[in-house]
Image: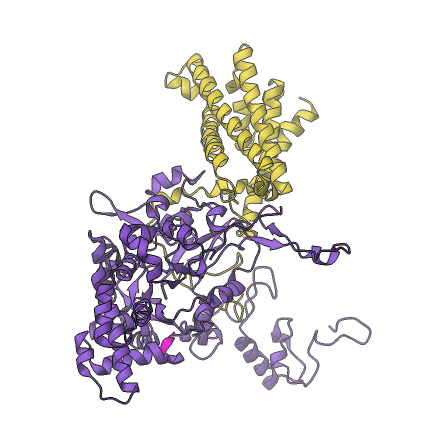
Chain colours: A yellow, B purple
């Protein structure tokens, strides 16, 4: 275990996750107005209707797969009778399908963004950076899965990467677990950390306010004038809130 | 019974000359920003015509508003909550910018920068969406005054519902203008469609607003509104809509569109209604019964039981007084001439319309008849089925009876008042023929024709008693603020919320009365308040020191 390993697999994750968490708090407090999907559907609908659901539903499955692979310990799945072979087959098949759907959707969306005039002119530099990091992460993840498991003999990341990932969250990070992982997995993890670090400052924030509350709230929302105040800050007492 | 107040509007279509002043002033006030170039909170459509956005009334295509499911219960026409969440990544019903129009500007710089040449330089149009040169082929009122009538008017979804025979003879028959704003519905489908819960109906006055801090740009409100009056700001990625000019009406002045209307055709007032009965009324099986059902939700402001319930619901006295004087209540109930726009959308719209009689009068006058004779007018209303059928599709879900009744009342007013103006004796029989008294007809004439400002707009101010608290008058406790007197905020002196001026004045005065010298202001917590500096002494921090340092 050398210093580089500590920097990459201890320092970097904590920095990225701290930026992720505090960045969202900061963004929510000071830029609620900018917290939006910034949909470009008004400009172009035909490509979006294929690309966007393909990408979003794909990435949702990918996220679920990561929860299953990283968060749930191998011992738990084995305790309920899921063998390593079974897990492996399911994870590789499902992961590859979802990964290809995600990547295909993303390719359509990026193609649309570049070629459709109004969409391109509504694309900021921030968006471009975000798309690059997002695409890199997805490509590396898919490549790692495909190369290690389909071309190669298979790699059981649940004995190395997953414990490392969990060790971060109970504050006993073990960089040696990660240091021995194949290069593609390492690169995928690093680019994911970079993605988490820029996340709060991009349009990806819309994910954190996925409207699941819609399923349970009453249809018609009534709000009183007093409850609602404009702006992200609490208004100062006095003359400012003319709506009061 | 719970009682809520609702700000509502009535527009008298007979007086609309289609000048678009309301649209222009509204745009100047609210949507003259980038991203809202195509947004018209207020627009004026020529009927028959396609409307804005194009064919928005075709709910088979756009699926706005509510419908009844097989159990007879109200559901969103575009699908329920689960379906909405599944189509959130690409909303299949979202209008494109082409359904509105591609906003443009002109290459004005060409006029100055073009080299000397034979021809006059021209400023070519450029799209504000792409920045490229564009060809203007549509706009918010492209079919104004039936422009392109034979090609464009047949696409009017309302016209298509009326039979073929009507369609052919239609454009000779009549044309009128329909100014539209957000309906501020009692049962708003845009609010119900918003996944984030960013759209809400204000409980004090019923204005439907978008919380810009909570909107996440899911776009479901745009498709949920059957009137297509929620717009997507394509720069900020947030929904925006007509605000009923709430900063204006809160202080008792009318909306910009009303204030600037040259025809003085808009009326603003309060309606009291029972919110618990809205869903029930919006669920009546027969579309044609929705007009009466919506009326049944509105309460009589003179009824002592309603007044008592309204007080119990916390509606202030001045609002109850405004509800009793409301021109809206008069036009809907006492005179019975206002009708809702598209009640069949089941959103319970609160901007109502007095249908135009002028097309009927025009046809009569054009054929050499006396257009103000009661007998002629009554006959013509019944004979000219075309306008009635069309108006009924707009205002009563296709039921001609209420439209006919309204037009007959307007006709009766016309001929009754002509006799008055010509110095003839008042003919009660004309009023009686439409179920009114002469006095009522004259009252209606005063409201519709003379339309005094103070009677057109009866707008109670927003909670005057709270305003008093704001100004720290005696209605609230002046020590009632964060931390209380003498307390500092969490980060030391002068942090936290500032102390009310009254408290500061109190301490300063006490200091002045009991202190040794005039400029001692230790109780001022290190801040200078010019309001309590009477010119005597030099309080700390107010003047610089001679040597450039702050006085200690």
Residue toward you, B520 or B268: B268
Residue toward you, B249 or B266: B266
Q: Identify which residue is drawn at 45% across, 59% down.
A: B144
Residue toward you, A135 or B296: B296
- A201 w.r.t. A84: above or below: below
Q: Identify which residue is drawn at 35% across, 78% down.
A: B449
Residue toward you, A150 or A79: A150
Q: Which residues are magenta?
A: B455-459
Q: Identify which residue is drawn at 30% across, 73% down.
A: B368
Q: Position of residue B122 (x, y in %)?
A: 67, 55
Q: Is residue B216 visible?
A: yes
Q: Position of residue A116 (x, y in %)?
A: 57, 38
Q: Residue most toward the top?
A: A153
Q: Position of residue B260 (x, y in %)?
A: 47, 72
Q: Is A201 included in the stretch rendered in magenta?
A: no
Q: Position of residue A163 (x, y in %)?
A: 52, 24
Q: Is B458 included in the stretch rendered in magenta?
A: yes
The kind of secondary structure the magenta stretch mainly shows is loop
Q: Is residue B197 visible?
A: no
Which quarter of the rendering shows the N terminus of chain B?
A: bottom left
Image quadrant in which you'd find residue B146: bottom left
């Amino acid at each position: 275990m050398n210093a580089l390993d500590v920097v990459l697999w201890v320092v970097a994750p904590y920095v990225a996750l701290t930026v992720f968490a505090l960045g969202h708090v900061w963004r929510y407090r000071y830029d609620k107005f900018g917290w939006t999907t910034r949909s470009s559907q008004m400009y172009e609908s035909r490509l979006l209707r294929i690309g966007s659901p393909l990408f979003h539903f794909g990435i949702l499955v990918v996220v679920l797969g990561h929860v299953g692979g990283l968060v749930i310990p191998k011992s738990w799945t084995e305790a309920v009778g899921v063998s390593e072979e079974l897990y492996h087959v399911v994870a590789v098949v499902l992961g590859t399908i979802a990964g290809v759907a995600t990547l295909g959707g993303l390719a359509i969306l990026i193609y649309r963004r570049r070629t459709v005039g109004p969409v391109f002119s509504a694309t900021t530099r921030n968006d471009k950076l975000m798309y690059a990091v997002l695409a890199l992460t997805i490509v590396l993840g898919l490549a790692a899965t495909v190369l290690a498991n389909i071309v190669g003999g298979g790699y059981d990341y649940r004995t190395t990467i997953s414990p490392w990932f969990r060790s971060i969250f109970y504050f006993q990070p073990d960089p040696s677990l990660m240091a021995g992982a194949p290069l593609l997995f390492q690169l995928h993890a690093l680019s994911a950390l970079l993605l988490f670090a820029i996340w709060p400052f991009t349009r990806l924030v819309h994910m954190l306010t996925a409207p699941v509350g819609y399923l349970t709230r009453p249809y018609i929302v009534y709000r009183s004038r007093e409850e609602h105040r404009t702006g992200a800050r609490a208004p100062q007492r006095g003359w400012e809130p003319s709506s009061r | 019974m719970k009682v809520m107040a609702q700000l509502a509007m009535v527009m008298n279509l007979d007086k609309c000359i289609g000048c678009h002043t309301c649209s222009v002033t509204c745009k100047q006030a609210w949507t003259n920003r980038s991203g809202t170039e195509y947004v018209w909170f207020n627009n004026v459509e020529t009927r028959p015509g396609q409307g804005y956005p194009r064919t928005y009334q075709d709910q088979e295509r756009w699926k706005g508003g509510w419908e009844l499911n097989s159990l007879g219960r109200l559901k969103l026409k575009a699908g329920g909550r689960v379906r909405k969440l599944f189509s959130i990544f690409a909303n299949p019903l979202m209008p494109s910018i082409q359904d509105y129009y591609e906003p443009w500007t002109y290459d004005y710089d060409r006029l100055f920068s073009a080299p000397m040449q034979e021809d006059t330089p021209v400023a070519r149009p450029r799209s504000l969406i792409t920045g490229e040169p564009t060809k203007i082929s549509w706009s918010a009122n492209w079919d104004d005054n039936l422009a392109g009538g034979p090609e464009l008017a047949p696409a009017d979804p309302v016209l298509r519902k009326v039979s073929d025979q009507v369609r052919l003879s239609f454009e000779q028959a009549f044309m009128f203008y329909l100014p539209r704003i957000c309906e501020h519905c009692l049962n708003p489908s845009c609010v119900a469609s918003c996944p984030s819960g960013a759209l809400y109906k204000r409980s004090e006055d019923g204005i439907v607003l978008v919380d810009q801090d909570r909107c996440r740009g899911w776009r479901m409100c745009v498709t949920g509104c059957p009137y297509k009056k929620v717009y997507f700001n394509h720069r900020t990625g947030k929904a925006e809509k007509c605000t009923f000019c709430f900063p204006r009406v809160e202080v008792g002045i009318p909306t910009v569109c009303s204030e600037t209307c040259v025809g003085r055709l808009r009326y603003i007032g309060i309606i009291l209604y029972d919110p618990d009965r809205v869903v029930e009324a919006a669920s009546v099986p027969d579309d044609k019964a929705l007009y009466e059902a919506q009326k049944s939700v509105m309460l009589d402001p003179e009824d002592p039981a309603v007044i008592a319930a309204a007080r119990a619901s916390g509606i202030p006295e001045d609002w109850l007084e405004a509800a009793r004087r409301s021109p809206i209540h008069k036009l809907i109930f006492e005179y019975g001439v206002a009708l809702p726009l598209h009640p069949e959308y089941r959103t319970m719209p609160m901007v109502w319309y007095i249908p135009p009689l002028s097309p009927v009068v025009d046809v009569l006058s054009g054929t050499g008849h006396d257009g103000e004779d009661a007998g002629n007018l009554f006959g013509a209303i019944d004979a000219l089925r075309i306008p009635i059928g069309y108006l009924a599709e707009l205002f009563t879900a296709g039921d001609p009876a209420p439209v006919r009744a309204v037009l007959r009342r307007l006709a009766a007013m016309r001929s009754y008042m002509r006799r008055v103006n010509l110095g003839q004796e008042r003919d009660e029989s004309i009023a009686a023929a439409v179920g009114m008294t002469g006095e009522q007809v004259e009252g209606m004439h005063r409201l519709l024709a003379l339309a005094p400002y103070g009677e057109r707009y009866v707008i109670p101010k927003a909670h005057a008693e709270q305003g008093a608290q704001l100004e720290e008058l005696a209605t609230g406790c002046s020590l009632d603020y964060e931390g209380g007197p003498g307390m500092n905020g969490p980060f030391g002196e002068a942090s936290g919320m500032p102390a009310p001026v009254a408290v500061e004045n109190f301490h300063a005065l006490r200091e002045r009365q009991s202190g040794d010298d005039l400029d001692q202001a230790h109780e001022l917590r290190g801040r200078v308040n010019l309001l309590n500096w009477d010119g005597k002494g030099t309080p700390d921090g107010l003047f610089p020191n001679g040597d450039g340092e702050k006085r200690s």
